[in-house]
């Protein structure tokens, strides 16, 4: 079994926060994938492409437009941006945002930018309307979050929205079921490579924050070829780091 991997990014900025990767590091990482011939595929093809990487960006920060889109275009890498429909063109000050955690206040892309990206091959996915902890809402509120955000994004960009990311990776079987009614694929925040038969509605991802040191990012190539066990070892290293 050869692992593939969905990478999660949030913001490309130099604040050093837990959601931030410096733009220069992002460019280095993309350069590394390209130099090493790692296939970068659209999210909806990752499960059937062993040894590949899919790139995802949560929240739809404006710095994606400035710093990520040109680099992705240069390398011809596909990517998915999960937008928060109720805050497009505004700021990441949704009610659940913990300010004390040192997360910077950042501007989000507007509809025009999302529409433009969609036309140039970036997939726009859904990340709810107001970025809540879904498991804390009523069933009707969960349905409303998913339905409203999907239909708003579809209307604005003029394309179907088939992918979803759970805010904070917060899901129970109830949220998974709700996501199944609206989307083909949904991403969680479980830290793992993809394995055969993994749940399309709770796909594991690897947060690029933990790979921001170049050396760690290089570890991404270990699952390719036959070195699956090496990948497990690498994951163990990442997990150890996480507990520090
Ligand atoms: Zn988010």
Image (spheres, rainbow, N blue to C red):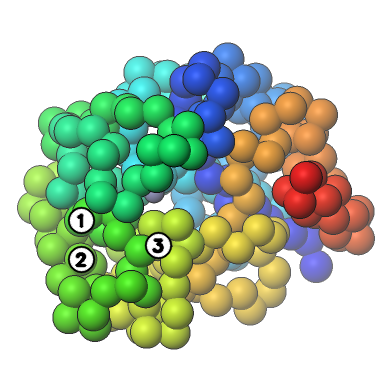
Is residue 222 rendered to the left or right of residue 193? right
Image quadrant assignment for residue 226: bottom right
Mark 3 residue element:
loop
Pick the quarter of the image with the C terminus. Answer: top right
Location of mark 2 (residue)? 145
Question: Which residue is at 35% across, 64% downward?
Answer: 133
Image quadrant assignment for residue 106: top left
Label 3 and label 1: CA atoms lie apart by: 11 Å
Residue 171 against residue 219 in the figure, above or below: below
Label 2 and label 1: CA atoms lie apart by: 5 Å
Looking at the picture, how far across and down is residue 12, in whole percent? 47, 25
Location of mark 1 (residue)? 129
Among the two numbered marks 2 and 1 on one chain, the one whose residue lies closer to the N terminus: 1
Pick the quarter of the image with the N terminus. Answer: bottom right
Are dots 2 and 1 in contact, CB under 8 Å?
yes
> As rendered, which of 163 and 244 lies closer to the eye?
244
Are dots 3 and 1 in contact, CB under 8 Å?
no
> As rendered, which of 218 and 142 lies closer to the eye?
142
Mark 1, Cα crowd under 10 Å, few <14 / some 14-19 / many 20+, is: many
Label 2 and label 3: CA atoms lie apart by: 11 Å
Residue 108 shows in the view: yes
Mark 1 residue element:
loop
Location of mark 3 (residue)? 166
Looking at the picture, how far across and down is residue 173, in whole percent? 44, 84
Is residue 169 rendered to the left or right of residue 120? right
Among the two numbered marks 3 and 1 on one chain, the one whose residue lies closer to the N terminus: 1
């Amino acid at each position: 079994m050869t692992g593939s991997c969905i990478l999660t990014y949030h913001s490309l900025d130099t604040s050093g926060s837990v959601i931030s990767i410096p733009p220069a590091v992002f460019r280095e990482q993309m350069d590394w994938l390209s130099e090493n011939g790692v296939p970068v595929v659209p999210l909806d093809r990752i499960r059937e492409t062993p040894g590949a990487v899919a790139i995802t960006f949560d929240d739809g920060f404006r710095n994606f437009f400035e710093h990520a889109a040109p680099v992705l275009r240069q390398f011809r890498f596909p990517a998915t941006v999960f937008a928060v429909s109720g805050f497009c063109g505004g700021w990441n000050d949704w009610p659940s945002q913990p300010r004390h955690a040192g997360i910077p206040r950042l501007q989000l892309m507007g509809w025009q930018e999302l529409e433009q990206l969609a036309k140039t091959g970036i997939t726009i996915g859904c990340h709810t309307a107001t970025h809540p902890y879904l498991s804390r809402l009523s069933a009707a509120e969960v349905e409303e979050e998913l339905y409203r955000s999907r239909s708003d994004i579809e209307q604005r960009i003029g394309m179907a929205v088939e992918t979803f990311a759970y805010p904070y990776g917060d899901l129970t079987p109830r949220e998974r079921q709700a996501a199944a009614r609206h989307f083909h694929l949904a991403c969680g925040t479980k830290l793992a490579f993809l394995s055969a038969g993994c749940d399309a509605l709770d796909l594991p991802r690897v947060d690029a924050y933990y790979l921001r040191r170049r050396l760690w990012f290089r570890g991404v190539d270990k699952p390719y070829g036959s070195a699956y066990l090496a990948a497990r070892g690498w994951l163990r290293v990442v997990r150890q780091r996480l507990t520090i």
